[in-house]
Image (cartoon, rainbow, N blue to C red):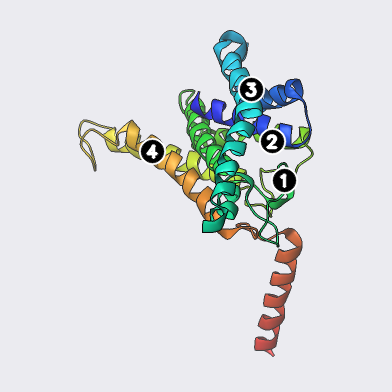
């Protein structure tokens, strides 16, 4: 529920920045929060899907979307107003950066809804928390159905597809694997889910038989959840620190780098 709520808040806020009114932003927020879980439910044959069987998920997403549309801009303006009052001590630009992700070349304010400056620190943090949470939830969906570990880890990626739907609706670069903008959804969610699944497999192996092989009582589930969640958040943190380059090269950049390596290798053989 925490991950869904955070995704709804950020999804509605991004939709609002894209120029949508409250209904459109709320719809995008709900799709962001529930879209990935819906895909997983359909893949696993869990119908009716979770938010249809339990409307509290839909209510939570709707309320969170309204918070992202109405409350976030008010909090932003209040925060930036404080920054104006502290302009002389240099806090103005840094405070805007927390919300908008950057300042202009003249050390002034960017446009209040200028999304070209990249994601804000706060929104990126919310998305990272949501992504880490849903990665573990997606992996658990596969584990409880005794699916192959690779499939369980992959469900940790598909459950984050709500962010892909949001990007399509808002005409943004797809966050699943964009080479720029440090939007490492796919890498982070798969890695977090894979760590959780791997620790669960280790736990099962450890507890198989009459005696524990490595750790008495096995690996606590709380520790497994923390490690899976922490891995996803850690990768997002590294991606943020690496921006705008991203974690991987594009296909064109990879081709140039590989050609350079082959050329150097050919010179060595001559």
Q: Which residue is mark 1?
A: 115
Residue 226, numbered circle: 4
> In the figure, 97 relative to 267: above or below?
above
Could you tell me how far apart the alpha carbons at marks 2 and 4 are, in whole angstroms? Answer: 28 Å
Q: Could you tell which of marks 2 and 3 lies nearer the N-terminus?
A: 2
Dot 4 or dot 3: first in sequence order is 3
Q: Given contact means CB atoms under 8 Å apart, are the residues at marks 1 and 3 in contact?
A: no
Give me the residue at 65% from left, 58% from top. Answer: 244
- Residue 216 is left or right of residue 177, and the answer is left
Which one is nearer the viewer's eye here, 59 or 72?
72
Mark number displayed over residue 66: 3
Q: Are marks 1 and 2 in contact (CB under 8 Å)?
A: yes
Label 1 residue SS: helix
Residue 92: x and y in percent read 58, 52
In-front residue for pair 2/149:
2
Q: Would you call the spot at circle 2 few (<14 residues within 10 Å), some (14-19), or many (20 or more)?
A: many
Q: Earlier in the sequence, mark 1 or mark 3?
A: 3
- Percent position (x, y) of residue 39? 65, 25
Local packing at callout 1 (Cα closer than 10 Å; few below 14, some 14-19, many 20+) is: some
The residue at 67%/52% (across/down) is 181
Determine whether label 4 and label 3 are within 8 Å by CB.
no
Query: Mark 1 near mark 4, Cβ–Cβ under 8 Å?
Result: no
2 and 3 marks in contact (CB < 8 Å): no
Picture residue at 44% right of the left edge, 37% below the top? 197
Residue 68 relative to residue 253: left or right = left
Label 2 sits on residue: 14
Distance in Å between CA atoms under marks 1 and 3: 20 Å
């Amino acid at each position: 529920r925490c991950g869904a709520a955070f995704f709804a808040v950020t999804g509605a806020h991004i939709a609002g920045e894209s120029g949508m009114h409250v209904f459109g932003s709320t719809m995008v927020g709900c799709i962001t929060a529930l879209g990935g879980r819906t895909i997983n439910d359909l893949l696993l044959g869990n119908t009716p899907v979770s938010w249809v069987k339990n409307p509290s998920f839909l209510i939570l997403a709707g309320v969170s979307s309204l918070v992202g549309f109405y409350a976030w801009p008010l909090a932003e303006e209040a925060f930036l107003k404080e920054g104006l009052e502290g302009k002389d001590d240099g806090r103005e630009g840094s405070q805007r950066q927390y919300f908008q992700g950057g300042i202009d070349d003249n050390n002034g304010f960017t446009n209040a809804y200028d999304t070209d400056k990249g994601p804000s620190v706060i929104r990126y943090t919310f998305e990272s928390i949501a992504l880490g949470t849903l990665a573990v939830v997606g992996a658990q969906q596969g584990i409880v159905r005794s699916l192959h570990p690779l499939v369980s880890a992959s469900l940790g990626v598909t459950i984050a597809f709500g962010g892909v739907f949001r990007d399509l609706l808002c005409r943004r670069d797809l966050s699943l694997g964009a080479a720029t903008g440090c939007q490492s959804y796919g890498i982070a969610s798969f890695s977090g889910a894979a760590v959780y699944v791997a620790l669960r497999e280790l736990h099962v192996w450890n507890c198989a038989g009459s005696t524990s092989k490595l750790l008495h009582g096995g690996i606590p589930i709380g520790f497994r959840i923390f490690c899976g969640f922490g891995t996803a958040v850690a990768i997002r943190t590294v991606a943020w620190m690496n921006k705008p380059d991203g974690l991987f090269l594009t296909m064109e950049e990879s081709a140039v780098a590989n050609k350079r390596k082959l050329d150097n290798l050919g010179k060595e053989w001559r």
